[in-house]
C-alpha cells in the first residue's frame, strides 16, 4: 500500500498543490496560497524550535503520505515543525492579514516571525489567526509546531493508527488541508450562515463580522446570471426567493449570493456565496409510513459509505479533479447519497457535492481507546447490543484512562478529583468533561444517584471544580448522573 498511487498522482503540481480557493461559501477575490514546498524538522517532545530544518515536505499533504515526499509516521513523543517563508504583495497593503488553516491534526501552535499568534486543538476543523501586527516588510517566517499522538491518545481521529492493519488506516499528522493568507478590510464579514426555507420561499442569511458597526450590507441573489433579489439587509435577514427552483440530485440548482459591506457609501468588503433551495425532513407517505423526505416529498436515498482515504494523499485528496471524479463516478453508478464516514472533508468536497447533486450524511469523527474486535466488529453484526455502562469492557476501567475525558462520582466524592487533574485535562485541550457514576458503588442503592449528586453539589471540591471549568469554557455533561435528567443547580 505504501507505493500504491492514484491515477491523479502524476498530475499534482508540487509547486502549489490544490491551488483552488478553499472556502467556496465565503469567497473573496484576493488571497495567497501557501501550499507547496516547506521546510520541516522532527524533534523530541521537549525541544525548542530547531534552528536548522533538514527536510522538505509538500504542503498540504500529511507527513505520512506519499505526496508529502516524506512518508514517515510522527510518534507521540515527537513534535513536528514546519517552516515556510513568504512575502506579501500589494493586495495586502493597508489591509488586515488573516492566516488560515484548513485542518491540522491534532494540536498545534503557530508562530509568525518568532511570535506565537495562537494555538489550536482538533484535527478536522478550519481555523485562522489575524497576524497583521506580527508582519514585517519583505520576507516573513511562518513556523507551526504539531503534536499528534494518533491512536495512543483519546482525541477524535477516526480510523487513524500508527500501525495500519485491517480497516485501520495510516495516520494523518500535521497540516493536511490548504494553508492560505487573506487580506481583509478593517470592516469585513467573517461568517455567513445560509438556511433555505422552501415553505416560506426565502433564504435566511446570518452574518457575523469585524468592525461592522456603522456599515450597511447589500445583498444580491442571482440564478444563472439573472438577478432574483437586490437590497440592503441586516446581519440577520430573511430574503425572498420567489418561485424558487428547488435543489435535488436530479436537478442540483444553486443560487449565487453576493454580499457587499459599505461604509459611508463606499464598498469595503465583498464576498460571494451560494445556496440551494432544499428541505430535508421526515414525513409520512400516502400509506402513513414515515419516510425520508426531500422538498416535502418521499425520496429514496441510495448511498455508499465514503471513507475518504487516498492511497497517495491519506486524508488529503491529490487534487480537485480527484474529488470531482469520486463524486461523479458515484452519480454515474446510480447513487444519490454519500455517508462521509468518521472524517470531515475539505470544504471544496461539499461544494462539489452541492453542484453535482449528491446528498451528504456527515458522521462525527470518533476517538477514545479501541474497545476490541468482539465488541466493535462481531456482536453488533449479529444483533447483540452492549450497554456502554460496563466501563471495564469499554477500556474505561483504569483510573488513568478515565482522566482524559471522565471524572467519576463515587458516593458523593470525585475519584481522582484533584484540581491538578482538571488543569491537566485543560492543558491537554479537553473542553468537554462527562461526569459518570461508579457502577460498583452507586448503582446498588436506589437513591445513590440523587444523593451523590446533591453531595457533589455541596462539597467544596464540587464547587471549586465547577467554577474552574466554567471560567475556562469547559462544558460539563452531567446527563450520566441521572436517568436522562439535568440538574441546573449543579452548574
Image (spheres, rainbow, N blue to C red):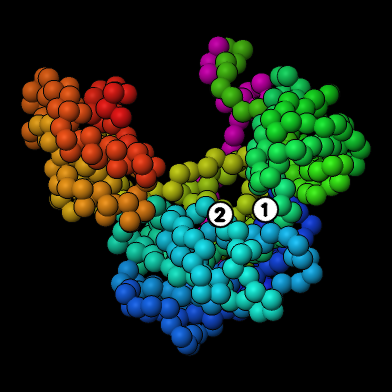
Dot 2: element: loop
Q: Nearer the viewer, residue 223 or 338?
A: 223
Q: Is residue 381 visible?
A: no
277 magenta-colored? no
Using the rendered view, name the quadrant where residue 142 is placed: bottom right
Image position of 52 (left or right of 208):
left
Residue located at (82% from left, 32% from top): 232
* Image mark count: 2
Q: Which residues are magenta?
A: 288-314
State the image coordinates of residue 425 (x, y, percent, origin top left).
29, 52
Image position of 406 (left or right of 335):
left
Residue located at (86% from left, 46% from top): 266
310 magenta-colored? yes
Estimate the spatial distance between the alpha carbons at disc 1 and disc 2, rounded to whole Å.
10 Å
Q: Nearer the viewer, residue 29 or 383?
A: 29
Image position of 24 (left or right of 436):
right
The numbered mark at residue 23 is: 1
Q: Find disc 2 in the rendering and name its residue.
A: 126
Residues tagged 1 and 2 counted as in contact (Cβ below 8 A): yes
Amino acid at each position: 500500500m505504501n507505493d500504491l498511487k492514484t491515477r491523479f498522482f502524476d498530475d499534482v503540481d508540487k509547486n502549489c498543490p490544490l491551488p483552488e480557493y478553499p472556502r467556496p461559501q465565503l469567497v473573496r477575490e484576493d488571497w495567497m496560497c501557501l501550499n507547496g514546498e516547506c521546510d520541516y524538522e522532527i524533534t523530541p517532545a521537549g525541544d525548542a524550535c530547531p534552528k536548522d530544518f533538514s527536510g522538505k515536505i509538500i504542503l498540504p499533504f500529511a507527513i505520512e503520505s506519499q505526496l508529502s515526499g516524506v512518508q514517515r509516521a510522527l510518534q507521540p513523543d515527537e513534535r513536528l515543525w514546519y517552516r515556510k517563508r513568504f512575502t506579501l504583495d500589494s493586495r495586502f497593503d493597508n489591509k488586515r492579514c488573516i492566516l488560515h488553516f484548513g485542518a491540522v491534526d491534532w494540536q498545534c501552535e503557530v508562530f509568525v516571525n518568532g511570535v506565537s499568534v495562537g494555538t489550536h486543538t482538533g484535527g478536522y476543523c478550519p481555523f485562522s489567526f489575524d497576524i497583521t501586527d506580527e508582519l514585517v516588510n519583505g520576507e516573513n517566517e511562518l513556523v507551526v509546531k504539531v503534536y499528534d499522538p494518533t491512536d495512543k491518545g483519546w482525541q477524535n481521529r477516526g480510523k487513524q493508527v500508527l500501525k495500519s492493519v485491517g480497516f485501520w488506516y495510516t495516520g494523518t499528522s500535521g497540516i493536511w488541508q490548504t494553508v492560505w493568507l487573506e487580506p481583509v478590510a478593517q470592516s469585513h464579514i467573517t461568517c455567513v450562515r445560509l438556511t433555505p426555507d422552501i415553505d416560506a420561499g426565502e433564504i435566511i442569511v446570518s452574518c457575523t463580522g469585524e468592525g461592522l458597526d456603522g456599515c450597511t450590507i447589500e445583498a444580491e441573489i442571482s440564478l444563472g446570471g439573472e438577478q432574483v433579489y437586490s437590497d440592503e439587509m441586516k446581519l440577520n435577514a430573511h430574503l425572498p426567493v420567489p418561485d424558487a427552483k428547488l435543489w435535488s440530485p436530479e436537478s442540483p440548482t444553486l443560487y449565487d449570493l453576493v454580499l457587499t459591506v459599505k461604509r459611508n457609501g463606499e464598498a469595503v468588503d465583498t464576498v460571494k456565496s451560494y445556496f440551494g433551495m432544499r428541505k430535508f425532513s421526515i414525513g409520512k407517505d400516502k400509506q402513513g409510513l414515515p419516510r425520508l423526505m426531500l422538498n416535502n416529498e418521499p425520496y429514496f436515498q441510495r448511498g455508499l459509505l465514503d471513507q475518504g482515504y487516498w492511497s497517495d494523499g491519506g486524508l488529503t485528496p491529490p487534487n480537485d479533479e480527484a474529488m470531482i471524479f469520486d463524486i461523479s463516478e458515484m452519480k454515474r453508478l446510480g447513487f444519490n447519497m454519500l455517508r462521509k464516514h468518521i472524517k470531515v472533508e475539505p470544504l471544496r468536497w461539499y461544494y462539489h457535492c452541492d453542484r453535482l447533486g449528491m446528498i451528504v450524511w456527515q458522521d462525527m469523527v470518533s476517538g477514545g481507546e479501541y474497545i476490541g474486535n468482539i465488541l466493535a466488529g462481531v456482536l453488533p453484526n449479529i444483533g447483540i447490543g452492549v450497554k456502554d455502562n460496563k466501563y471495564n469492557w469499554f477500556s474505561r476501567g483504569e483510573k488513568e484512562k478515565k482522566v482524559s475525558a471522565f471524572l467519576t462520582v463515587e458516593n458523593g466524592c470525585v475519584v481522582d478529583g484533584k484540581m491538578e487533574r482538571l488543569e491537566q485535562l485543560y492543558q491537554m485541550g479537553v473542553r468537554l468533561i462527562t461526569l459518570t457514576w461508579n457502577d460498583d458503588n452507586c448503582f446498588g442503592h436506589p437513591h445513590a444517584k440523587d444523593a451523590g449528586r446533591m453531595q457533589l453539589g455541596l462539597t467544596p471540591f464540587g464547587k471549586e471544580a465547577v467554577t474552574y471549568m466554567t471560567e475556562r469554557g469547559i462544558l460539563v455533561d452531567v446527563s450520566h448522573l441521572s436517568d436522562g435528567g439535568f440538574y441546573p443547580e449543579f452548574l
